[in-house]
Image: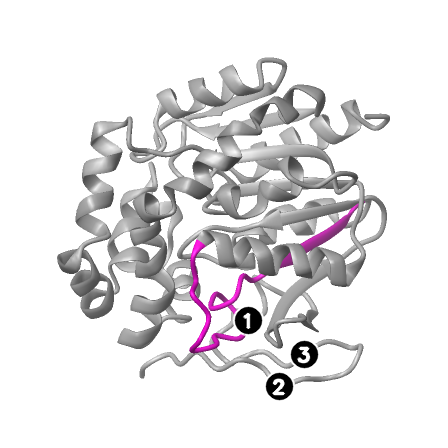
Amino acid sequence: MALQHTPPAEAGDSGLEVPSWVDRAAYPFSVRSVRLPSGNAMRYVDEGRGDPILFVHGTPSWSFEWRHVIRALAPAQRCVAPDLLGFGLSERPRDFPYTPEAHSRELDAFVESLGLRNLTLVVHDFGGPIGLPLALERSGIVRRLVVLNSWMWPITDDPAMARAARLLGGGFGKFLYERVNLSPRVIMPGAYADRTKLTPAIHAQYLAPFPDRWSRGAVLWTLARALLASSAHYERLWSRRERLRNMPVSLIWGMRDPAFKPGTLARWRDAAPHASVVELPVGHWPQEEASDEVVRSLLEFISGHQEA
């Protein structure tokens, strides 16, 4: 039976109903919703009390990827994990551009709507160029930054990444995204160092939100095209990297990531030479493959910078 992406109906403070495909044993959180100034509704998890941590996912994932971390940190921290528009349980408007720049504007509006300040910002994959404007272009929003396998600069000077981006962002790439569901079905498993960690049950949670050609093309392929098409956005972020020198930064890295290789981590080290660095023998999703180590690293980082 085909899995269908059906945004939940609005509900009261007790949270929202969720689609039947969501594994509630793995993802038991109350799902909330905020209507942004654009008119779009963003779903999110808001668990625990204490200083807020904002988790920003990438593609083709959603807040489900943070489930282990949220469960572990919520007893002492407020964990806020939105689903970007078009992903997970959030609305998927037909007229939204789904570029990193557009996602970044909606995330900024989300933070303002919730009144979040003094954040620990945790970003992964495209969550970097989407979430980092909060740290690099705003004042008083982000207190600490944690980066997992991400980037914030144009990839045009990396021949291998640029070549892959041209393929994925072109017409043939769009065909594969729409017809084969390339991103969650092929690219995602290939980015795990240990593919057994991506069980059929977990994989189903990433496949379910994209059941049709339109969603795969509009939401997922648009970000593949943006690897090169949004270079001006990445260049603007990179030009503001000096902000990182005055901010506590932690780099938690899957060293067996086939896309964001050790050279990418080295560039982050140059941008934030004071950062704490945790290297893990896993792939692109450390929070999935090595959740205990990621939780331990986050707790040590946060406790070590309480007065930052």
* Three-letter amino acid code of the residue under disc 1: Ser
Residue tagged 1: 90
Principal secondary structure, stretch drawn in magenta: loop
Q: Locate the N terminus by quadrant.
A: bottom left
Bin the neighbour count of mark 3 within 10 Å (Cα to Cα): few under 14, some 14-19, many 20 and up: some
In front of the other: 156 or 221: 156
Residue tagged 2: 9
Q: Earlier in the sequence, mark 1 or mark 2?
A: 2
The image shows residue 194, relative to residue 252, as above or below, that is: below
Secondary structure under tag 3 reads loop
Residue 16, numbered label: 3
Reply yes or no: does residue 91 show up in magenta.
yes
Q: Quadrant of residue 255?
A: top left
Q: Position of residue 262 (x, y in %)?
A: 37, 22
Q: Position of residue 54 (x, y in %)?
A: 68, 48
The image shows residue 92, relative to residue 292, as above or below, that is: below
Q: Locate the C terminus by quadrant.
A: top right
